[in-house]
Structure formats: structure tokens, C-alpha cells
Image (tube, rainbow, N blue to C red):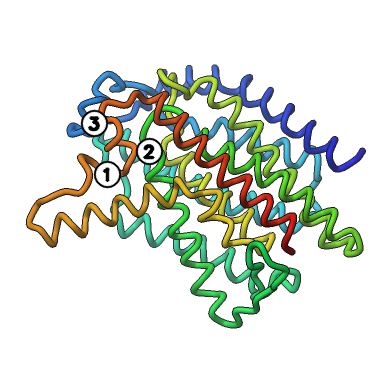
């Protein structure tokens, strides 16, 4: 079976699994009243009160099962990658569980969540740094330059995981947004994996490891397509932090393990927008005694208050992600 055929079958299989899993998960979460508490100041979301959450379980199970079906358990990249993704998903699950149990929108304390994120980031960073096929080397987009960061690689990679998981989490604010953006991200990265595997034809071990990441990316892409059937506006289930933190972990793993961390702000440009808009809003609010740059942050909520519909915002975010994603794909083709 060719690599390209495996990727296609992975997409289809994970999509079907996601579609099959979603109805019973929705039924189960409703039965246990695992519903999302809506923030009082998000007026546009009052009608969403009671929508079940923790839907990230749907695409995480679909992705994991499909990846192992088409890759087995031999790939270190795949085992660690899925393990890290599920680790972030478990942290998000705990956060969601506490929100549901105490019926408010605060689960884990901010410092508790950061400690958990950092702990998982340390594990994956040490693996990447110690594993000879990754080491401390990163690729520079649009060039054939491989830059050895030395020991700076450790704090740099820790920052990537912390920043990206939080940025994806912030992007999960309206129906279908984080799922659509990450779906395009993983679709683009699946194509990037094909390019990298062609280039690594002479290095069998690294090619196979990279191929396993391609299968993981394709599996997540298909699983998110299935999930979006139930998560698009009006959503029947939210992904919750169970899903958004896990997606941040997966996005980081795919980039770091292929030595392409600088592709994250390119393909994930809308994640960065969410994160930067919050930082600007908070800093400006504190420096000007309560004035605001945006009507509300993250930026997608600002657009809502400007009168844009959720579907329009999702379309806008998806188009921009696709354009920057194709740019990243071109950078990989002409670079290393």
C-alpha cells in the first residue's frame, strides 16, 4: 500500500469513526448533564446554555484508533505524539469536569493549568532534544537552512507548546471555529508530510517516522471533519478544553517532530491572532484604566459584537488559514 493511499484511507476511516462515535457521546454527555456553562458577559451565547461539552473525546479516539490501524505501534514519533496529545486532552478533561461538577466556567486554576501544560511540555521537549533525528535542529521556512539552536532549543520548544496550546484554546470560542481552523492545519500538514517523505527517500528510518506523523495528521483531519458535522453552528456538542488543549498539543507535535516549528505561526496564523488580541486587550486595559482596543477579546468575539454571524467568522478564519497554509506548503516544497 502506497503512503498516499494510506493517508487517504486514514482520512476516510477516522471520518467514519468520528461520525459513528458522535451520537452516543452526545447522548452520554446529555445523560450525565455534562453541559457547558456560558460566561454571563458573552450575550450572544445565552442560547447555548446546556449544550453538552467534552466532545473532544470524539476526534481524539477516532484519531488514535485510526493512526494505530495504519501505522501499528512501532513508530516512536507516533507513540509519543499521540501520548502527548492525549495528555493535553486529559488535562482539558479535568478542567471540563471541574466546570461541570461545580456548575461554573472556572475549572482548574490558571496556575494549575499552566503547571500541567508545562509538565507535559517538558516530557515532549526532552524526547525531542534527546532523540537524534530531531535534536536541537529547526528548519528555516523558504530556505534549505537547518539551524542548530543548541541548548536554547529546550526553552524555545517549551514556549512553543505552552503558547500554542493556549492559543488554540483561546480560538475555541464559537461553534466550529477551532475545529475548522485545525482541520485545515492538519490537512495542510498531511500534504507537507508527503513532501518531506519524498525528500527523505534515502533515510528509511526518518522517512517512516515522518510518514507516521503524516498518518496521525490525516487521521486527525478526518476525525475533525466528522466532528464538525455535529459541532458546526448550531453545535450539538462543544469540544471543550478536552478537545482544544489536545488540538494544541497535536499541532505542536506535528511541527516540532518534523523540525518545522516556524510553520506554526504561518499555518496557525489565526491561533496567533486570538492570543495576540487577548494580550493587547489586557495590557491596554491595565495601562489606560479600563479602556479597550476591542469590543471583546479574543478577536472572534470582537467580530461577533460588530454584527458578524458565527458562520461568517468561521468562513473568514478558515480562508485566511488556508491561504497561509498553502504558503507554508510552498515554503516546504522550495525549502528543506
First reached walking from the N terminus: tag 3 or tag 2: 2
For this orientation, the residue located farthest to the left is 289
First reached walking from the N terminus: tag 2 or tag 1: 2
Task: Please state the horizontal and vertical placement of residue 6, each as a whole percent of the image.
Answer: 83, 37
Task: Please state the horizontal and vertical placement of residue 3, each as a whole percent of the image.
Answer: 85, 43
Quadrant of the frame with the N terminus:
top right
Kindly report the distance in space between the C-alpha atoms of the residues bearing marks 2 and 1. Answer: 25 Å
State the residue position of label 2: 97
Q: Give the quarter of the image for residue 203.
A: bottom right
Disc 2 to disc 1: CB gap under 8 Å: no
Give neighbour class at mark 2: few <14, some 14-19, many 20+ (Cα, 10 Å): many
First reached walking from the N terminus: tag 1 or tag 3: 1
Q: Which mark is residue 305?
A: 3
Q: Is label 1 in a helix, a strand or a loop? A: loop
Q: Is residue 25 left or right of residue 13?
A: left
Q: Nearer the viewer, residue 150 or 79?
A: 150
In this rendering, the answer to whether 227 lies above or below 65 is above
Kindly report the distance in space between the C-alpha atoms of the residues bearing marks 3 and 2. Answer: 30 Å
State the residue position of label 1: 297
Amino acid at each position: 500500500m502506497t503512503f498516499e493511499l494510506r493517508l487517504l484511507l486514514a482520512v476516510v476511516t477516522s471520518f467514519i469513526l468520528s461520525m459513528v462515535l458522535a451520537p452516543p457521546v452526545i447522548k452520554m454527555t446529555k445523560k450525565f448533564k455534562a453541559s457547558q456553562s456560558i460566561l454571563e458577559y458573552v450575550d450572544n451565547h445565552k442560547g447555548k446554555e446546556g449544550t453538552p461539552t467534552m466532545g473532544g473525546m470524539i476526534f481524539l479516539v477516532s484519531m488514535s484508533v485510526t493512526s494505530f490501524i495504519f501505522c501499528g505501534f512501532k513508530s516512536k514519533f507516533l507513540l509519543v505524539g499521540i501520548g502527548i496529545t492525549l495528555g493535553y486532552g486529559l488535562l482539558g478533561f479535568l478542567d471540563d469536569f471541574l466546570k461541570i461538577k461545580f456548575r461554573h466556567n472556572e475549572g482548574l486554576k490558571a496556575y494549575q493549568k499552566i503547571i500541567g501544560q508545562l509538565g507535559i511540555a517538558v516530557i515532549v521537549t526532552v524526547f525531542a532534544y534527546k532523540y537524534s533525528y530531531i535534536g536541537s535542529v529547526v528548519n528555516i521556512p523558504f530556505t534549505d537552512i537547518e539551524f542548530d539552536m543548541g541548548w536554547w532549543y529546550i526553552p524555545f520548544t517549551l514556549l512553543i507548546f505552552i503558547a500554542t496550546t493556549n492559543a488554540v484554546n483561546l480560538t475555541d470560542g464559537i461553534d466550529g471555529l477551532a475545529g475548522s481552523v485545525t482541520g485545515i492545519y492538519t490537512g495542510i500538514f498531511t500534504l507537507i508530510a508527503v513532501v518531506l517523505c519524498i525528500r527523505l527517500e534515502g533515510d528509511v528510518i526518518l522517512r517512516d517516522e515522518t510518514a507516521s506523523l503524516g498518518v496521525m495528521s490525516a487521521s486527525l483531519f478526518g476525525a475533525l471533519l466528522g466532528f464538525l458535522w455535529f459541532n458546526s453552528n448550531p453545535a450539538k456538542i462543544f469540544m471543550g478544553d478536552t478537545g482544544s488543549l489536545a488540538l494544541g498539543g497535536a499541532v505542536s507535535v506535528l511541527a516540532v517532530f518534523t523540525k518545522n516549528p516556524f510553520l506554526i505561526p504561518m499555518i496557525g496564523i489565526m491561533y496567533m491572532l486570538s492570543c495576540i488580541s487577548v494580550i493587547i486587550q489586557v495590557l491596554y486595559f491595565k495601562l489606560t484604566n479600563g479602556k479597550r482596543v476591542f469590543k471583546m477579546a479574543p478577536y472572534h468575539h470582537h467580530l461577533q459584537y460588530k454584527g458578524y454571524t458565527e458562520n461568517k467568522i468561521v468562513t473568514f478564519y478558515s480562508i485566511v488559514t488556508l491561504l497561509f497554509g498553502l504558503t507554508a506548503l510552498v515554503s516546504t516544497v522550495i525549502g528543506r
